[in-house]
Amino acid sequence: MKTLIGRSMRLALAVLLLVSPNLALAKDNLIIAIPGLPSGVDLDRHVSPQTWTMAAQLFESGMEWEMGDYPFESGKAFDPTNLEGYQYPIGYTTQNTTPALFESCEEFEGGQRVVYHIQPGIMSAWGNEFTADDVIWRYNREKELPIIYALVSHLFNTDTATKTKIDDYTVELTNDVPMPLACPGLTNFYNAWLDSKEVSRHASGDDPHSANWLATNGGGFGAYYVTEWSPGKRVIMEANPNYYKGEPVIGRITYVVVPESAGRLALLQRGEVDIAEGLSPDEINALADNESAAGVAVRGNSQMWLIANNNHEEMTDLRVRQAINYAIPRTEIVDNVYHGMAREWNGVISSVTPGYVESDAYAFDLKKARSLLEEAGKGDGFTLELAFSAGVPEMENMAVLLQDSLGEIGISLDLKKLPVAAHADLVQSRNAQLALWIDSPIQPDSNYVMSLVYSSGDLALVNYSNYQDDYVDAKLVEGSAIADAEERIEFHKDLQSHIREDAAFGWVVEPYFRIGVSRAITGFRWFTTQYYKVALMSSK
């Protein structure tokens, strides 16, 4: 371990020397240590923790959730309010928004007509103004290239709408079906808006949609733009001098790759980086008494899933999946793995999502679990493979606890630790038997979340457990068009209970977003796609 940490430190220091020869952090240059560079920052194609935190600097949402005081109790060592200027997106639960790229969004005729009002004068780093033409272009582009943007539009029912430019700053959407998420969906990070003029400049015959350029540039109207992308080493972003909220105080962001979390922690403790991403709960606690840096853990919308392949011969019987849920030691995981930086997950959607249904149906009960296996004819036990990611340090501790717990009811687990990419490939191929997986469907709407996770149709982007239920599929289609907010919430409550009873997979815990931040930084805030915005920060 000492050798590995030493190599990581030497690599990081070498990169930092390129950034700042004296290793003294300039107040207008924020240095962020990350585990590795993502495949890219094109939100139409890329999904990863570093995609989120980097793309957040390059893009701006249509609308933003209202900010307010942190609404949850927290541990002293990781309380985000320890950081000066901290605020929380309380609008995620209250559904209150504030303007961003759009001044406002209006709904008419029960949600069948929606009008977007764009804020005039918003300029990209390339000097182009955000107008109705960019909105229409984005919608046309997703028809030609149906990837993530098209999926989000489908979930919002805006994919079938007619889009009309009223003037340079007004776009009207009309549809035969209600579009209840068209306005709140403007907060969605994956409902991104691009500088169509600049993106189009980088198109070619082999790359008509500028995918290669977007991967390392983003192409949004955010506070920063990429000036260097060195694979495996670093990324540099400079402030957008035209940023509509005013040019950021921090003029440059430098991301440096430090593969081991211990190396990232050490650099933060020494004051040689300003932010360290991907720290373990133990490493967050290690910052408790540090004078120069603080560990932060923010309760949000992340969930730890125990993927349980419904097509595997041992788990086609729902009693087996129920037994697995009864055998998950959630309290022990919260206390001993996360040290309080998580909460037990006793539902099927995030507990901060409006309409969440709490249930103690799977309170830890090994006797009940063994009984269910007997009823299912599996009393003699069987073996399953449990895959987990080497890039999420707490997963290994969880895997060991699950191995012990499930072993007591006769399910023997073979633990398989995989590199980050291999783990993601296995889960997303839907071929894993059992697998630990972190996800966070980001729109605070029960139909949106359950359609992504539990439907078996075209919308089931993250149904990695191969769960299929005709009743669930039909109800989600019906629920998608309910425009009244209260009626929409009530409609989906029984559906949550049905999915819970069906044991679609294993619901483990809701981990908090964790990060290490210099105490010299003010204005740090967490946003609901597990990112922060440097434009809101300054350095003392």
Image: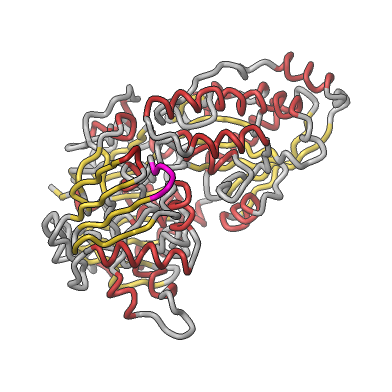
Q: Quadrant of residue 523?
A: top left
Q: Is 173 placed left or right of 249 in the picture?
A: right
- In the rendered image, residue 442, in percent from the top left (x then y), is placed at 42, 42
Q: Quadrant of residue 408?
A: top right
Residue 503 belongs to magenta span: no
Q: Which residues are magenta?
A: 175-179
Q: Is 176 placed left or right of 69 in the picture?
A: right
Asked if residue 317 can be seen in this view, the reply is yes
Q: How is the image coloured?
A: secondary structure
Eyeballing the image, is 209 above or below 522? below
Q: Quadrant of residue 36?
A: bottom left
- In the rendered image, residue 48, in percent from the top left (x then y), is placed at 47, 54
Eyeballing the image, is 250 above or below 464? below
Eyeballing the image, is 442 above or below 162? above
Eyeballing the image, is 348 above or below 119? above
Residue 177 belongs to magenta span: yes
Which residue occupies 29% across, 25% down?
A: 71
> What secondary structure characterizes most of the magenta part?
loop
Camera-side residue of 242 and 104: 104
Camera-side residue of 446 and 405: 446
Q: Is 66 placed left or right of 473 in the picture?
A: left
Which residue occupies 65% across, 23% down?
A: 501
Count the labels in the image.
Answer: 0
Camera-side residue of 364 and 259: 364
- In the rendered image, residue 248, in percent from the top left (x then y), is placed at 15, 57
Residue extending farthest bottom:
205
- In the rendered image, residue 243, in percent from the top left (x then y), is placed at 16, 61
